[in-house]
Amino acid sequence: MAFTDKYAFEDMAYSTADKSGIVTANVEKMDDHLHTRIECTAGETIALYDAIYLESDGKYDKAQADGTQQPCAGLAIETAVLDGTFLAQRIGPITNTGWAWGTVGAKVYLDPSTPGALTDTKPTTNAQMVGIVLSATSIFLTGLVHLDDASETVRGVAELATTAECVTGTDTVRIVTPAGLTARMAAPGEIGGTTPNGITLTNEGLHILDTNASHDLVIKAGSDLTADRILSFVTGDAARTVTLSGNPTLDDWFDQAVKAASTPTFGGIVIADGGTIGQAAGALLTFDDTGDKLEIDIAATESLRVDADATAANTRLSVYDVDNAALERVSVGAADSGGSGFKVLRIPN
């Protein structure tokens, strides 16, 4: 007795007596090896041409593209009630006179809303292709589990982005590779733009960690701009440190040095009431707007005062009298008291 190499069918010579037995055995082997159809036990009532899937209890229920009642294992070619047995076709052409497919060659999918149904409209999620349209009433079952296109929420098949697509940065379908990301970061221009020359952030600002990475320093625009503005820092060829105390406001740029050793020139200076110019331990000029006067202190003693006195025969000047150790008002003597055409300036004895 001899057997075929691939399926171990028994060879049958013309002189073999029990031809019927050999044919029966070989047909049974063919039935075991052909998997276009499967025997199923129904987990619910199954109608003719219902799409089915295998449940965890080993029974077949109506399939649906919902991520749970799938993948589709085939179409029922017999009806069945709960726990009844039926045949299902997995692969190959199948005809249903109740179908009305529109386009030959179109893909047929498991329906996302009706259990057991098919559709030629691809579901937006959990799409599973089960066959290809052959005619209005026939499809060819592929017998394969087809993966959906990958997305942010669905695992599936995706194409790799080219370097050019990575640099452009607008494709929402393809997957970026490390090489593409490297090319994107190396290209000049805005992130998200085609030619990056900078980084555009939302008004949440640029967040920089502090020295122990516990908090952020946030740099952001604090007003509504009417056009793009540039804030530039010119450090010179050296490391610099800027220390801010309080909330300084610069209404205009300085056009000259204003350091302690500098001699700046200003168009005018307005000193606040009670403000001073001079040295704390030496001569000090005090501007008293409340008292409407100007004082010069020397060695912490008021030595000269100019005020708004309007008393007759007085001047607006007071000077310090060393003999009396007091500030004395300078008054005016009688006409010609200082000679013809002159008055004497005097202070009390």
Image: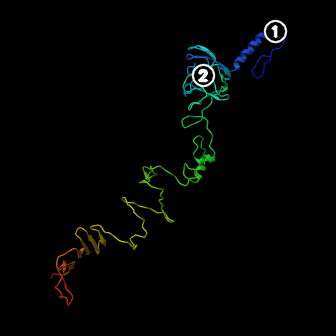
| Extreme residue toward the left, this view | 349
Q: Residue at x 22, y 73 (%)?
A: 308
| Circle on res. 117 | none
**Residue 100 versus residue 222 in the image, above or below:** above
Residue named by callout 1? 17
Q: Is residue 278 left or right of residue 244?
A: left
Element type where label 1 sits in the image: loop
Q: Quadrant of residue 263?
A: bottom left
Instruction: Tell me which numbered mark, 1 or 2, is placed earlier along the sequence.
Output: 1
Quadrant where the image shows the N terminus: top right
Q: Are marks 1 and 2 in contact (CB under 8 Å)?
A: no
* Position above or below: 189 against 277: above
Residue type highlighted by circle 2: Ala
Most distant residue in the right direction: 15
Q: In the figure, 218 relative to 307: above or below?
A: above
Residue found farthest to the bottom:
340
- What residue does disc 2 label? 51
Residue 232 drawn at (x, y percent): 48, 61
Q: Quadrant for the C terminus, please.
A: bottom left
Q: Position of residue 17 (x, y in %)?
A: 81, 9
How busy is the neighbourhood of tag 1: few (under 14 within 10 Å), some, or many (20 plus)?
few
Front-most of residues 13 and 195: 195
Q: Can the viewer see residue 326?
A: no
Residue 153 against residue 162 in the figure, above or below: above
Q: Position of residue 304 (x, y in %)?
A: 24, 77
